Image: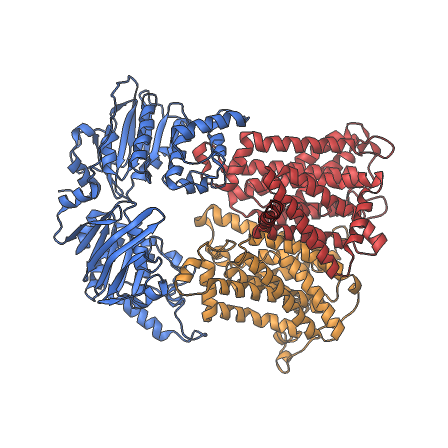
Chain colours: A orange, B red, C blue
Amino acid sequence: MITIENSLITVIALSTPLIIAVLGETISEKSGVINLSAEGTIMICALFAFVFGYLTDIAIVGLIAGMILGSIIAAFLSLCDIKLRMDQIAVGFVLTILCSRLSSYLGQDYVRISGPTLNKMPIPLLSDIPFLGNILFNHSLITYISISLIPLTWLLLNKTTFGLSLRAVGENPNAAKSRGIDVQKIRFIGTLIGGALLGLSGAAFSLYAKYGWSEGHTANYGWIVLAIVIFGGWNPFRAAMGAYAFGLLQVLAIKAQSVTLALSQVLPLLPFPLMIFILIFIQYINRKDSSSVPLIIKSLIGGNQPESLGKKLPKEL
Amino acid sequence: MNFNDLKINFIRFILSILIIFFLLLSFGINPLDVTNALFIGSFGSFEKIIRTILVWVPISMASIALIYTFSSGMWNIGIEGQIIMGAIGATIIARSFLGDTFISPYIQLFMALAFGGFWGLICAILKVKGGVHEIFSGLGLDFVASGIAIYLIIGPWKRKGIASTSGTEIFHENSWIPTVGNLDFPIFLLIVIILVYVFTFYLLSHTSFGLRLKATGINFFATNKFNFSSERYIIFSFIIAGALAGIAGFSQVSGSYHKLVPTISGGFGFLSILLVLICSRNIFLTFIISFLFAALIVGGSQLQIKLDLDHSLVGIIQASFVLSWLILQRVNLEKKILNIFSKVFTK
Amino acid sequence: MKIELKNISKSFGSLKANKEISISISGGIHALLGENGAGKSTLVKIISGQLNPDKGSILISDKKISLGSPKIAINNGIGMLNQNPLDFANLSVLESFLVGNTQNSFMSNNHKTKEEILHLFDNYNIEIDLNEKISSFSIGQRQQIELLRLLYNGVKIIILDEPTSAFSLEQKKMIFDTLKKLTKEDITIIFVSHKLDEVFEICDSGTVLKSGRVVYSMHKPFDSDSIFAKMFDDTRTKNKITNKEKRSDKFKLFIDELDKTKQETFSNESLIDFGTVVGIAGLQGSMNDKLVNNFFSRDFSKTGIFFDNGDYIDKEKLYYMPADRLERGLFEDLTLKEHFALSYSNRSKYLNWNDIEIYGEKKIQEYDIKATITQKVDQLSGGNQQRLMLSLLPESPGVLLLEQPTRGLDFNSANKMWDIILHRKKNDIAIIFSSTDLEEIWDYSDIIISVSGNTIVNIESKQNLNKENLARYVSGILD
């Protein structure tokens, strides 16, 4: 039955992978590194997670496998960035294409096979609360993980020494160095954590939100992650809101499909450009005339781009 | 490009190929078998050579398009959308009353140019006037173009009775690109692409336009000392890139498929980004590597037939090739090898 | 806190940046003065541990310290404020204080730390919200916060490297008050500056460097005349100067912000002959360069050059050379040849590389640029980049707007440069240049605009000026 309750449950469940990815990328970008391989990473980790889950018939093994592969890819990117001083955007882009194609190739034998899935794990007592209980406490393990990652990410970034050092590196590597911080190490770890979460996100697709594997299984989600991080102003809570908003758009699009047949193929695609255009719109307005922007929009999207984002480390470091 | 660069590029090429071979071996595939299959698949017969050319043209077009935008310092990820819009532009003419006239291809070319150029212009304006990063505007417009194409294919342009994503009706023969001979050698496209190559080579290295474009990409702020505006040149670069990408779309739709399909760009846009990452502004290198990539794609169909290998292997080879090249470039292995060589040979 | 430098020497290849520098500071605020290239920044880097000297030692409280490591310097209580604050734009004040500082991995309730920090700020009469982002403060405030952070970390010797260049008057007063208080707590301050008025205001002692050596040591009360003499004195002999050909065409200079404290003998709108050289004199960090830039940007509400008939000069005729050549005037990845092509490209769309090469080689000869035409400009030394920039100015008549045209050039090269510039004088409309070298201003200008800080102090024909007044004007010392 189509109720608001059910719809909200669906939104939260479907958004699970996106939440994880968005939080991971936020951490990475806070340390100054854009992981443009997100699209490819999520896709190949979805495959990996599925395969390992399938082979062991334990979904959690799949989740871990996804995380590990995600870290490996991110480590590669980070080494190219820190040790070889290559352009992170160029390397990220090539990795995206490579990993996407690899996933198609390696995944041939696993198309449309059913593997393990993560079942709903209702939390006793709490899930009995009417309405709210059902919405929040009647989900799978991975969804619980995704929800708890939101405050955890915030805590990591804002309440730990590591998080502080990470953000310092993302702002001004030179100044961070002068405070005795090992800039290379921190940047590496930041990218690694981001990659691990991207990998977990891929696993969340193939083992939960979109069961199984098919060619191009997670297509375009990686790109949208990058957009949502900016949309969220590099703040975990806002980014999460953006991810849920996107999830909502998707659910609406699916519902609208049954209404207009002609557009049915197009509608599921609509959320992607829509999200990006909202972002563009906001950036445009923000740039054009800061004073005329209503305060509520400013507070919603006023982003604090880490000053060193996307830049190579200074030569002296 | 001087002789020393030539030597280095050559060695880098060989090293990258070796890395690919190694990669294939690790997959349990015999690299020589693959090479053989690819070669036969792309050059084994006259028809196959023509097919290779038909893939080489749009890849070249897109790559040259990207040379313009990379020159001015921009990441034109919107190139996929520009190709699609060019294809749509051409399709409009092909499906119109002009579709069965003999001038149809020429008008199509023009429309493709215009549509693609317009699509590129949008990114440029958003960047210059709104400070919106071209990666995002490009991505957004890629999605939109893709969506428009799909909508047209299953909506207003659907085939009679069937609304399917396999494409529109096949174009009237007069709307196909002009060819010669029994095997339909694509002379028209060949002329166009050669002209574009020559024109670009000339434009970039022998005119102030080309030099200014390059300067804009190097130092956005110093250009006013030499009396030109960076913003203008960024806009120019996007319009030209979009136009050329549009022609790639035209080539796809009227040269290869003879109809509009959802995957009309064939991923050539992103592939060309990979290409330009290694070729930079080197026209000669672009010419060669784009041929290599085209041969890989066309020859790739043989992989399935002869060796039972999925076509996606081609993409893996291409991306690995580029990644290896980029890393080798950074590590500068070639110089060391050249040094060893010269020491050995001067003994 | 006493700090002594003994025979500090440092060379970079053939360039002797510091030669046997010995300075003894027992406390208070000590000024480090000197022109560009005198060796100040090298010395400062040595003290703060970023560089290792070739020879010499540093003693703090009569104890020798090890050199060459920033960490050791910090441990010895040495702290530095750069020109650009080394802080973190998107972090809060509190967080900026804590970076690199906390012991535990989980930031426990920072109540105690917060209290300590607030107390510190309070001591210096500064109200602050620790949760506010650093980026919401002005540069001056950010420097202040940095300063207090150094104090919080227990510095005993603070080096201020031209800290007030971006300050408003208000902020300068604030920080000076803070500095004075610091000295009462046995904190020694080394104040690197060009601004003599500031030095006179707060310093207790000072050292003047020139060409890597100590040329003068002083204590309060300061004798301005001898300081001027030491800073600006130059025993080099000049070669010939201007041959004054009177030309009939005239133009006017319009400068909006003219602030006179002396009686004007020069109206800012009077007619000036074509071919006049206008020198804008000012110390490092003053608006002398900015004024040149104003003429180029053609913001007519501020500055303008226009002809007798009221027409403003065309944009194409303004030939501008910025002070930071690589950042704003040259393209680091392009070769010299390509640069010549760019300036050539104003004439034609088509580039004939043969012609350009000939043109370029000619210029390289003429301007004595030590480079080959196929080299990329980032491989050139600063001086050669300077010469290149000059050579790129179009040959046709126009107005030359030159920021510090001979900066980084040795005496002979500078002379040669001026030969070429003056050669153009016959055809050009005007030559407007800025410089921190008062001798240069004196030698070549017909009209001199003196600026101090952000104020235009005077504008007058050279005939009506003398060197002492000029020095006074630019130092902001007016009696």
Q: Residue at x 68, y 30 (%)?
A: B195
Q: Quadrant of residue C455?
A: top left
Residue located farthest toward the front when viewing the structure as drawn: B347
Would you say A153 lies left or right of C296 here?
right
- Where in the figure is residue A253, as x and y percent of width and height? 69, 57
Residue located farthest toward the right when viewing the structure as drawn: B182
Can residue C345 be seen here? Answer: no
Q: Is residue C118 above or below residue B222?
A: below
Q: Quadrant of the C terminus of chain C?
A: top left
Can residue C218 be seen here? Answer: yes
Q: Is residue B177 above or below residue C96?
A: above
How many tags in the picture?
0
Residue located farthest toward the bottom when viewing the structure as drawn: A125
Q: Residue at x 43, y 65 (%)?
A: A181
Q: Quadrant of the N terminus of chain C?
A: bottom left
Would you say C396 lies left or right of C57 here?
right
- Where in the figure is residue A238, as x and y percent of width and height? 53, 62
Residue located farthest toward the top when viewing the structure as drawn: C248
Q: Quadrant of residue B171?
A: top right
- Where in the figure is residue C329, as x and y percent of width and height? 42, 38
- Where in the figure is residue C178, as x and y percent of width and height? 23, 60
Would you say B264 lies left or right of A27 here?
right
Would you say A275 lies left or right of B300 here?
left
